Each structure stands twice: as structure tokens, then as C-alpha cells.
Image (cartoon, rainbow, N blue to C red):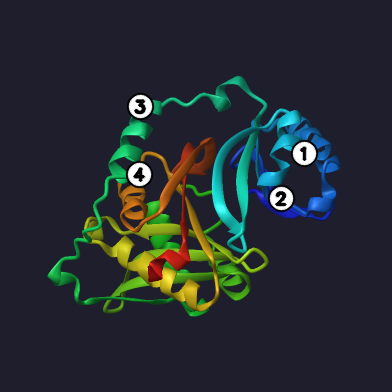
Amino acid sequence: MYDIIEKLRNSIIQHGFHNNRIYLMKLYEGDTPDILQDLDSLARNKGYGKIFAKVPASLIPVFTRKGYRHEATVPGFFRGVDDMVFMAKYFSPGRCLEKHKERIQDIIAISQEKNTHRLINNDEESVRIRRCLPSDALQMSLVYKQIFETYPFPIHDPAYLVDTMRNHGYSFCAMNREEMVALSSSEIDADSLSVEMTDFAVLPDWGGRGIAIRLLEQMEEEMLRMGMRTAYTIARTLSHGMNKTFGKMGYTYSGTLTNNSNISGHIESMNVWHKDLKSKWT
């Protein structure tokens, strides 16, 4: 059973036992500070282990006073000007403890190395990148099922994928003739002119061939044309490939979300990377 997305006051939250958390996805600033008590009450009543909040940096003091800690930042998230921060509050002792701190730091360090060389094999000329259509949803769901046992959002459900593509997201695929071999998506926040680069999945036989980088390049070009200013991602901390992909593409690491998301059957920590899309032209 996936977590539900609903309104709390005038803000948007996701919550449930799948991720065992509340995610404050879109805060209406007029809801502060009262919404913080609402979030606490919901977390305690349901027994959730974490509240994870995406908020303007100007509200850091408000959230800090209520027991939140600052975990990551996306500079220029709001129309390329104001910063956004991820704040977290924990309700169980184990949820805030990072089990893989040294491994995560090693992966971040490797991913931050100044290596801009993009290795794409000559035999990948047959692979083309294109935008997905609602008619691709079933095939997309089958790819995601092969890669992720569980996921924070219901990407295994074709109806969810269709709804996302029709409302606020753009999906991209890598096709080897008629076979879909990789996927990704861009989740747009039109109000802030920011976009989350997410939902990357490459079939095992196609890994290590630069396909994720090709997807990300296409996504950036499309998002620039649509007027997006800032791109960011929330990547699995122990995924060498995805962290290196964003490092190679000029993204900056800005924090780790501890024990944050249910992916492939268990709760994982996530790294935040960000990029000013205008830098693509400089």
C-alpha cells in the first residue's frame, strides 16, 4: 500500500507506513507556524518515524525551534533566487542514525572528482532517447518493476505514470529499437521554476554504457526550453552510478537525507545534488 498525497491546511503532504514518514511536499507559507503542530500530531498519532519537509530557507529558524534539523539545501530553488532547504524531525531513535556514513562519504568524494569525460560506447548508436507518451505507461511500469522492489511513489502503477505525465511530469526513455532499456523523469514545480530529476532506471544488461547521462542531458535541454531555472535530484546514497552521473554532469552535492525513502524493500538514505541550469550555457 503506497503512501497517500493530500492537503493539510493549504499545503500538500505525503504520508503513510510505506515510507514510515510525513513528507511536506509543498508548503503554503501562510500555514506556518500552526502546521508544524499539525504535522507533529499526525506523526505521533500514526507512529511515523520521521517528518521530512521542503521549505524556504528563510523558515529555518521556525522549524529549528520545533525540533527540526537542516539536512540539505537547493540554492536558487525559488525562481533562481531564493534557497530551499530540506528539514527533518525524527520520532524514533534509530531513524536518525546513519549506518553507512563512511561508505556514503567515499561515494560522494569519488562523485565530486573533476571528471567531465562521458564514456558512451560506439555500439550504443542504436539507442535513442525520447519523451515518453501515456501509451508507454505499461511498458514503463514493467521496467520499474524489474529495477525497484519498492519505491517512495507508485511508479509500478501505469495509471500513476499516466497521471504524472499529464499533470506535472515529463518522462524520458532510452529505446533499443522497440525495447525500452532505461527511464527517467522530470518533476516540474512551475511556481518555483525548479525541477526534480528523478526515477532513473537502467536495465541490468544496459548498465555502464552512459545511458543515464544521455537521459539527463536530454532532460536538461527540455527543461531549459520550458524555462526551468534550477534542477536537483534526491539520489540513493549507496548508488555509485547515480551519484557519479550527477557529479559528472556538474551537479553539486549539498546534503544527505538520513533514512528517508523506501526503495527496493527497505528505508535508504538519499543524497541531494543541485545545478543552476543556466550554467549549461556557460
Alpha carbons under labels 3 and 2: distance apart: 32 Å
Q: Earlier in the sequence, mark 3 or mark 4?
A: 3
Q: Dot 1 lies on which element?
A: helix
Circles 2 and 1 in contact, beta carbons < 8 Å:
yes
Total marks in image: 4
Q: Amino acid at mark 2?
A: Ile
Question: Which label's residue is closer to the chain start, 2 or 1?
Answer: 2
Q: Whole-Å distance between the Cαs marked 3 and 1?
A: 32 Å
**Disc 4 to disc 1, C-alpha distance:** 31 Å
Callout 4 amino acid: Ser
The residue drawn where x is 27% and y is 45% is 113
What is the x, y in percent for residue 81? 61, 59
Q: Residues within 10 Å of mark 1 (few under 14, many from 20)?
A: some
**Disc 4 secondary structure class:** loop
Q: Amino acid at mark 1?
A: Leu
130 with respect to 25 (left or right): left
Q: Is residue 8 visible?
A: no
Tag 3 residue? 102
Per the model, the C-alpha gap separating discs 2 and 1 is 9 Å
Q: Nearer the viewer, mark 3 or mark 1?
A: 3
Instruction: Measure the C-alpha gap from mark 3 to mark 4.
Output: 14 Å
Above or below, comparing residue 47 to residue 141 in the picture: above
**Residue found at the very far top of the displayed protein:** 93
Mark 4 burial class by Cα count in 10 Å: few <14, some 14-19, many 20+: few
The quadrant where residue 121 appears: bottom left
Q: Residue, x 83% and y 35% (percent of image)?
A: 37
For residue 107, side relative to residue 267 (left or right): left
